[in-house]
Amino acid sequence: MDSSVLCTETLRVDGCIKSANKKRKLSRDVESDIESLYKALPRLAKTFRIIDKIGEGTFSSVYLGEARMRDGSRDLFALKHLIPTSHPTRIAAELQCLTVVGGRENVMGVEYCFRKEDHVVIVMPYMEHQAIVDIISSLSFEEVRLYIYHLLKALRHIHQFGIIHRDIKPNNFLYNRKAKTFALVDFGLAQGTADTQLELLKVVRQKPSQPKAGSSTERQDKAPPKPPSTTTASHQSTAHSPPSSSSSPTTSSAVRKALIKKTRSITTTAGASTSRSARHTKDLMGIRKAPRPVFSERNLNSCTLAPSITKQANTSELVKRVKPGDLSNRRSTSARGGPATVRPQKPQRTVHQPLTCTCFHTDRVCNVCLARKQQVAPRAGTPGFRAPEVLTKCPHQGTAIDMWSAGVVLLSLLSGRYPFFKASDDLIALAQIMTIRGSRETVRAAKSFGKAVLCSRQLPRLDLRELCETLRGRRPSPDDEVTPVRQSLDAKAREETPRHAQERGKDGVSETVSPLPKRQDQTPGKKASSGVDSTGLGDERGWDGVPDEAYDLLDQLLDLNPTSRITAAQALQHPLFKDL
Ligand code: ADP
Ligand code: MG
Ligand code: ZN
């Protein structure tokens, strides 16, 4: 008898772990997690040998599992175990995204789903992939072009169905470098557009998250309290059985049918639950290495703001309500959600206000402002990838938010820096964006979607080619002929104080506050200089000949205004991809 037969009823949990350990040395924690998973979902053990844990966040753990198929072959699967407190509608919505749009156009599909009580495991085909952080320094320009092309294909596909992914970032877009395959994963935060075709996304649509104090969350919106017992009690264990199991054969369409049936009952009661809480995800890929971002809070703060002022004050100085007189919806003083510094332009209610704001044009937030009611809008996602309309809590958000995130991914790949933006606070993130895209431009764009943003200093818009080439070390820094901006960026940012900056600026408005390269005029369409390779040698990875089209696409993805931002369908028609 083949001792490695996996799909027998006799395979015991303990034995399974032992045989897995023969191949891989698992940590004690992983071993015990696997054991707990087998216990929570005993049927898993009849089908899968769980080999390792390959991803972990607060809201899910992803395991690598092996199963023996009917034809005797062995297949690898990714088993995503959602935390038991996930809301049933959220789980069903994630599954519905995978079943309806997955399995094609670079979107991960789903094979099976197991459930017992509140434990749910989504089984997907395993896709071997490399973490971007591990390969970013060795990527060729051609690989970057292909990566973005395939990401755009996935986005066009999901957007056609009215799905907003909300968490586009390299950790959620798997890339197998050798096989040149790509897959968008993780619909755990997906929402529907106004005309979404996915029933469950209509339910999870427009339920904004509550602002959270000191939000340093990577993700939000995902874990409401315990699901209402009425919705889960009627669900039967194991929605579908894998191929070698003794139960009836299942396919994705069977999954779909079962899902629709199953989710129908969920949707009827799910509307009652609206509260959500923060989600802190640490993908294993992400925590294994902690590369330095181009922006961190530290260098940005010291770059644009006096080092002595507090973070709360910092943000208020950077972005603030324009009209100090609008005091709508006051409530007792609370720092919940941090300083109420970004507000809708129109007051929600006009009532007599006995108090006046005293913080306008100062570096602190007054109690009146702290007491303002926060506007509530969806803000799930990873801070460094959040679009300006998400950061400013614009209630109307569409598929354009994914396009912005794709732009941040492209910026990262072209500059060779990952992550590019890193901020735990939305306003710091917005300030970082302003440093690249210009403060006046950001203010103007925000106004177009109904937000008043005030920036205490004028930050010029940077030339994207110059920025990326400088960060790659292919261009000397304009500030320092010898040191590339790569080094000066962080170092200078720490040294530069607003006082220095203001001394050099006109009318108290600094133009040198950012240590990043200054704007350089570039004729559109013209092939710009290939950049100075600091080594004096050509670059076989193609970084010495990046076409203007790449930066033009980047510019259109990082359009601050969501209404004019390029769509995925348009981006695929971009001249950068004309031969694809
Ligand atoms: P989370 O919601 O916790 O972020 P994800 O669905 O993003 O969960 O999965 C976390 C990680 O697990 C991914 O970044 C990826 O590394 C890995 N992973 C997820 N799905 C697969 C898959 N089908 N094949 C291979 N690895 C996967
Ligand atoms: Mg993820
Ligand atoms: Zn105030």
Image: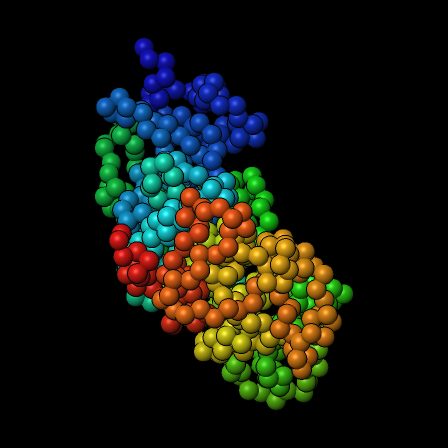
> What quarter of the picture does the N terminus occupy?
top left
Q: Is residue 296 visible?
A: no
- The spot of residue 140 in percent (x, y) is 42, 45
Percent of width and height locating residue 91? 40, 49
Image side of residue 299 versus residue 254, left or right = right
Q: Indicate the position of residue 579 as horizontal and vertical percent values.
A: 26, 53
Specify the quadrant of the image occupied by residue 421: bottom right
Q: How did the renderer colour the structure?
A: rainbow
Foreground residue among 354 and 528: 528
In this rendering, the answer to whether 394 lies above or below 232 is below
Q: 33 or 502: which is nearer to us?
A: 502
* Residue closer to the observer: 487 or 568: 487
Q: Is 253 located above or below residue 389 in the figure?
A: above
Number of on-image labels: 0
Q: Residue furthest front?
A: 536
Most distant residue in the bottom direction: 352
Q: Residue at coordinates 63% horizontally, 54% vertically from top-left?
A: 483
Up-down relation of residue 160 to residue 448 (above or below): above
Residue drawn where x is 34% and y is 55% of the image? 152
In the picture, measured across the screen, residue 60 lies left or right of residue 494, that is left
- Residue occupying the far right of the picture: 308
Q: Which residue does the image show at 42% across and 65% down from the upper left?
A: 555
Q: Position of residue 250 (x, y in %)?
A: 24, 36
Q: Residue at x 64, y 60 (%)?
A: 480
Residue 528 can be seen in this image: yes
